[in-house]
Image (cartoon, rainbow, N blue to C red):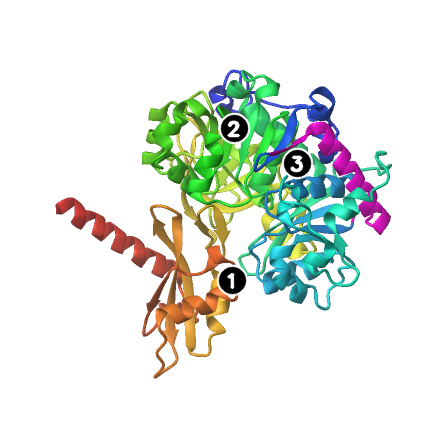
Amino acid sequence: MFEKSWHQHYDYNVPTTIRYPRLPAHDLYLLAANTFPDKPALNFYGTETTFWELRSQVRRMTSALGALGVKKGERVGIHLPNCPQFVISYLASLSLGAVVVNLNPMYTADELGFIVKNTGMETLITFDLVLANVRPALADSGVRRVVVTRVTDFIKGFGVSTPKELDLDQGWHHFSLLMEGGSSTRVPRVDVGPQDPALIQFTGGTTGVPKGAVLTHANIIAATFQASLWGNATVTLVPPEKRITLCLLPYFHVYGNIVAMNWSLFNCATQILVPRFEIDEFMGIIANFEKITFFPAVPTIITAVVNHPRAAELGLDRRLGLLNSGGAPMPVELIEHVKDMGIYFSEGYGLSESTSLGISNPVLGFKKAGSIGIPFPDMDVKLVDVDEGREEVGPGEPGEIIMKGPLVMQGYWNNPEETKGQLRDGWLYTGDIAQADEDGYIFIVDRKKDMIIAGGFNIYPRDIDEVLYQHPKVMEACSIGVPDEYRGETVKAFVVLNPGEQVPERELIDFCKKKLAPYKVPKIIEYRESLPKSAVGKILRKVLRQEELEKLNMKTKQDSAG
């Protein structure tokens, strides 16, 4: 007898519950270092680092950071793209009991500065190409240690940069020199427990102010084990010596952090580190490997890869093993395309607050197009009435997704009010509205929050609105996500100008580019005389969304009639 109705749909090898080891997250890679010391742990543009070499580098960096004064509980910001330096910094920081703060390299100075101050960060590990944003972000902050690298320092043949070349400020440290100076490979005697914070992952808030989800070592261990066992039906057939993960998902995002980096460390897989997505370059990287065991991605990336002119030439149907999609819904046409190619795939759903996981379609078994699947092992999921969030709704009825289990965050960093609003009696209220069918498969129907998901990035329209309001000629602004075939959604802004003013669309977009990360910048501006408002004067974002959907439906009908 199954404890939960959805357990009957699990693949044959997936347990309904898992016994998680009381293990700190940074110890995940030691199994591979011990059993496959000479296997490449990392491959960065052809430069390989074995698991044993990674172990040595991590311990030297741990020693060096410890000598600088990094202690348990301190926040260490990692402000890097996917590269060996990220993996080393992450594992070394956790080894000291420090709390890693994931930082998107595309943050503007203002966005970066907010997080630095909000977390009380004392150490920042960054790279040369973003120092123009780092310097103003650190003004009047409490950051005492800055470590800088050049991403190419870990590619053979490029040479290693010098502090002078990087134009380091007084007192800043050069990554490679600091690591080389780490004198000890002894394991630090720091007591790190399962409930100790490991990671702060920032996500937007309904108020427009970013919130830092605090994820514990237990959260990361649970997520890594759940993701691993969910995909075991195909992965265990590949000997550990041959396991390779294509790691394009950014490690500063919780999805890439768990499903690419931590998954690979635990499964003895070589991480093919890709710091940027340029489709032709990326297809060239794929061509270098005969068989890729695991490729976690977002729908826009999958679409670009499987439809690329080189897809047939490279034999992607033979070359790709397990494909995982998250971050946004997979279009049905894309699902059918991947199935026709014979590539095993799983599409899932999660949040920063649930360590990126929660619900997914089985790898081998019963999938439903358009569904995000069924709950992971040890996760309890309910759909409750949208207004009160108390009564569970029946099959086919819309309700808010709430979840409980070992993936759920500890709370929001230094934000008890937001924590209280989103965590109630251990249940995480996701803000996403869904329906469940008679088999327990869950289908997203709407979002209670106003979040826009474009190309796998979570975008909060308030961030964009605030920037538009800073333009001297703008009187009112409201941003929404509109359907986009490639990105899932794209950002559209509705703007009311001050009387008598005129502003070219390009001028407003360029204004936003100076203040927002590129993926947040509106792609479409529509000027209006006024915006829809409630009786108390609140701009009704949902009305604008509905208008756009009606336009899309009308166009679809016209296209069908034509």
Q: Amino acid at mark 2?
A: Phe
- Say which amino acid is labelled 3: Ile
Give 384 or 552, whichever is nearer the viewer.
552
- At 39% from the left edge and 50% from the top edge, which residue is drawn? 489
Residue 220 - label: 3
Q: Amino acid at mark 1?
A: Leu
Inter-mark Cα distance, 2 to 1: 33 Å
Circle 3 Cα neighbour tier, 10 Å, few/some/many (<14 / 14–19 / ≥20): many
Q: Is residue 39 left or right of residue 465?
A: right
Would residue 311 appear left or right of 517 to someone viewing this image? left
Quick one: which residue is furthest to the left in this view?
562
Q: Which mark is residue 516?
A: 1
User: In the displayed structure, does residue 197 sit left or right of residue 103?
Assistant: right
Q: How far is the residue under mark 2 from the one under mark 3?
A: 19 Å
Please give the range of residues in magenta: 47-73
Say which residue label 2 marks: 294
Element on which disc 3 rests: helix
Q: Nearer the viewer, residue 233 or 154?
A: 154
Q: Which one is earlier in the sequence, the residue at label 1 or at label 3?
A: 3
Give the dominant element type of the magenta stretch: helix, strand or loop.
helix
Q: Are marks 2 and 1 in contact (CB under 8 Å)?
A: no
Residue 142 in percent (x, y) is at 76, 62
Question: How far is mark 1 from mark 3, CA to CA?
Answer: 30 Å
Magenta-colored stretch includes residue 299:
no
Q: Quadrant of residue 179?
A: top right
Measuring from the top left, give residue 251's x and y in whole percent: 59, 42
Look at the numbered disc 1 and give the secondary structure of its residue.
loop
Q: Earlier in the sequence, mark 2 or mark 1?
A: 2
Looking at the picture, how far across and down is residue 560, in whole percent? 16, 44
